[in-house]
Image: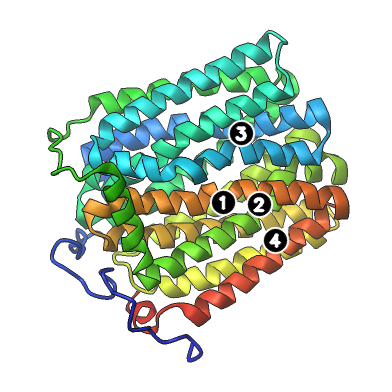
Amino acid sequence: MDARAPETPHDSPPLACERLSPETEPLPPPALGGWGAVFRAMRHRNFRLFVSGQIVSLVGTWMQMVAQNWLVYRLTHSEWLLGATGFCQHLPVFLLAPLGGLAADRCSRHRLVMLTQTLSMVQALGLALLTLTGQVQVWHVLAVALVLGTINAFDMPGRQSLVIQLTGKEDLLNAIALNSAIFNAARVVGPAVAGVLVASLGEGICFLLNSVSFLAVLGGLLAMRLPAFEPRPQKAALAYLIDGFRYAQRTRLLRVLLGLVAAVTVSSMPALVLMPFFADAIFHRGSQGLGFLMGAMGTGAVVGTLVLAKRPRATGLAEVIFVSALGVGLGYVLFALSPSFYLSLAIVPIIGFSVMRHNTAVNTVIQVFIPDEYRGRIMALYAMMVVGVGPFGSLAAGALAARFGARLTVMLGGLLCLSAAAAFRLYCPRGACEAL
């Protein structure tokens, strides 16, 4: 509001919401009405192939995520080790994502994603074999989580940067929102299926099915028709990397958005890490209860991103970002106070709705308004904030829960998110936020 801090003379405004350029200004979307506008990016063959593979693969990914957390909980019943597992999986993204962004800006993004998806399939198969043969130990899970995190540090900037090549600028907003919706549709199906499979057949089957699911995305990538990769004139790798950091540092709106994403991520980690503890120790619903809670959160996220996908342009997104951050914070506070499983089951869709509207809106603003030459490196910074800072939240969540209890830990996360939303309203550059 009026309390927002003014721009400083040292802030340069290269984002297109502050100064649009011919290269970054989005083209008008096709004239589609109603729900047809929601799926307009699907008219692109390459994007349809991408989506088809992602739907299958992401269901497997969510199955593995739930089964992995349950496996650690079953083996140890330790809140701290649940946090340590998240730490191992996300820390490499924080440390190595800049290198992934560098690769996405200097190499073929299509080939980069092919490589990372293949490696992801191999790690899932390794964990499946360890679990199905009864050899798995906690340190195996932690090691595999580190490997997967390293792969994701290169996969996330590559996939995020590839989307524009699959749709073009005119449908980029819609494609980003649909991609988020697909991610969260899998978040509905994957945990629910994992809850049933873990209860009946064990965690190893989930890991094995996840490994097989990568064949779908690899098939889609192989079937794409993309222009031949044309490398840009190459600077020294270190200079290229530093240039990306400098671009982000001198753009105040980008700094504010990335800071808010980091705060929302850290705020979310207590609930995500401790969800198995809530499902079993607090609500006494076991692995099926965990699957229902995660699935309900994903349902809310799908609804939120589909509604956002109807927007033809990136207008009014500053308000979406602010209100969504408030919704996340309030949702976690209410979840921490909830006395029953069914009330919690009603609250988590609101959290999912708010988290993904927030992240999708921020992703949209950044993707549309940055020059393509910086896309990989800036999306690497986004990956660091939305995933990479998670390890610190995971460790803190495990440590705080062991000392003060799960409920208070989740409530502290909610209060942090509410504070971050207020800070965004205060420090978002006035002209930029009004233009969004």
Which residue reaches farthest top? 133
Tell me where residue 73 sits by quadrant. Answer: top right
Disc with the residue nearer the chain's start (1 vs 3): 3
Identify the residue under disc 4. 413
Q: Are marks 2 and 4 in contact (CB under 8 Å)?
A: yes
Residue sitting at 81 percent across and 62 percent down? 337
Disc with the residue nearer the chain's start (2 vs 3): 3
What is the x, y in percent for residue 213?
A: 46, 23
Distance of label 4 from label 1 (alpha carbons): 14 Å
- Can residue 353 be seen here? The reply is no
What's the residue type where badge 4 is placed?
Answer: Gly
Identify the residue under disc 3. 65
Placement of 362 over or under 164, stated as above or below: below
Please tell me how many numbered marks the rendered image carries: 4
Q: Are marks 3 and 4 in contact (CB under 8 Å)?
A: no
Distance of label 1 from label 3 (alpha carbons): 18 Å
Q: Are marks 2 and 1 in contact (CB under 8 Å)?
A: yes
Disc with the residue nearer the chain's start (4 vs 1): 1
Mark 4 is surrounded, within 10 Å at the Cα level, by few (under 14), some (14 to 19) or many (20 or more) other residues, namely many
Instruction: Name the disc covering residue 389, or none.
Output: 1
What's the residue type where badge 2 is placed?
Answer: Gly
